[in-house]
Amino acid sequence: MFEDIYSSAPGRALSGLLARPFISKAAGRFMDSRLSAPFIRPFIKKHRIDLSQAEQDRYKSFNAFFTRRLKKGARPVSSDASALVSPCDALLTAYDIGEESVFPIKGRTYSVKELLRDDALAEEFSGGRCLVFRLTPTDYHRYIFPCEGRITGFRHIPGVYHTVRPNALKNTHVFYENTREWTLMETPVFGKVLMMEVGALLVGRIVNTVKEGAFTRWQEKGWFEFGGSTIVLLLKKDACAFTLPLDTDSELPVKSGQVIGFRQIQKQ
């Protein structure tokens, strides 16, 4: 819908206005209101969304529908404490974090330092793995912790909202300009892990309900309101042995709670 404006110079100029936080906040208020309810059914029909797994099938606003909860058991998770699971429904791409702490995201190169705005913290993940989970409009937009542990740091980075769809990625440093929040976690299985939520055009809020203290395996962490969104997971070197064929050339569909790896067995 919105990604087409990035295909031309006038469109990109317009995107500069649309990307302003006050525009996104106004759109968010509209999506919270009953006035947005008539958009629900056309959206469901267009994207062929199956509501059979949702707790309910009637909603007072578009955001109430977009952030809908699923029935218990709709996203089964492993009971194995050594498992790392997907934090969300998404398309997953994995990248190595090289010596200079940079990696490509959809044809552009981004450094970990730009994402985190913390040089010392970025260095800690050098040699590790970066997992990029791109949520589409049809995905379930609530997300969970991928393992258990405790939060040791949290940061909100304000910015402007640009869409994360492909055409936009060719013309703007999307992740650098977007509002984002990262949570630093100390985990007994995978060591230090960082999870970042990235907002997009017309996403009024990234709603993180847990920002400090301990968290349990697969506990809900928060949700995205209307729009495209992305979660970035940073793992340190040799922290996880992946069970999925992850690479930099394709996006692998995953579901929230799906096992994507296990604790790496250290060589003696």
Image (tube, rainbow, N blue to C red):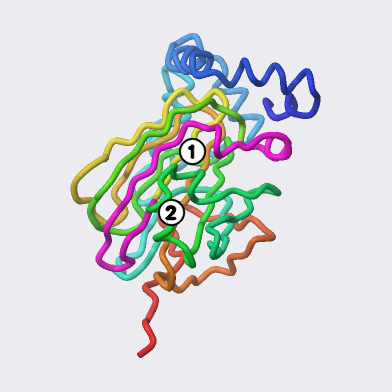
Residue 97 position within the rendered picture, expressed as x and y whole percent measured from the top left: 53, 62
Residue 22 position within the rendered picture, expressed as x and y whole percent measured from the top left: 49, 14
Between 219 and 161, the residue placed more toward the observer is: 161
Residue 88 position within the rendered picture, expressed as x and y whole percent measured from the top left: 45, 48
**Structural crowding at the residue carrying mark 1, measured as other residues with C-alpha within 10 Å and reported as few (<14), some (14–19) or many (≥20):** many
Between 220 and 19, the residue placed more toward the observer is: 19
**To which quarter of the image does residue 172 belong?**
top right
**To which quarter of the image does residue 135 belong?**
top right
Residue 75 position within the rendered picture, expressed as x and y whole percent measured from the top left: 41, 52
Q: Amino acid at mark 2?
A: Ala
> Is residue 125 positioned above or below 170 on the image?
below
**To which quarter of the image does residue 188 belong?**
bottom left
Per the image, the residue denoted by label 1 is 198
Determine whether the residue tagged by mark 1 lies in a helix, strand or loop: strand
Mark earlier in primary sequence (1, 2): 2
Q: Which residues are magenta?
A: 165-194
**Residue at the image position 43 percent from the left and 54 percent from the top:** 122
**Residue at the image position 39 percent from the left and 60 percent from the top:** 124
Residue 186 is covered by the magenta coloring:
yes
Whether label 1 touches label 2, CB < 8 Å: no
Q: Kindly give the residue lying farthest to the left in the view shown.
A: 213
Residue 112 - label: none
**Residue at the image position 57 percent from the left and 26 percent from the top:** 201
Task: Tell me the quarter of the image containing the N terminus.
Answer: top right
| 215 relative position to 257: left or right | left
Per the image, the residue denoted by label 2 is 122
Task: Tell me the quarter of the image containing the C terminus.
Answer: bottom left
Discs 1/2, front: 2
> Is residue 115 positioned above or below 14 on the image?
below
Determine whether the residue tagged by mark 2 lies in a helix, strand or loop: helix
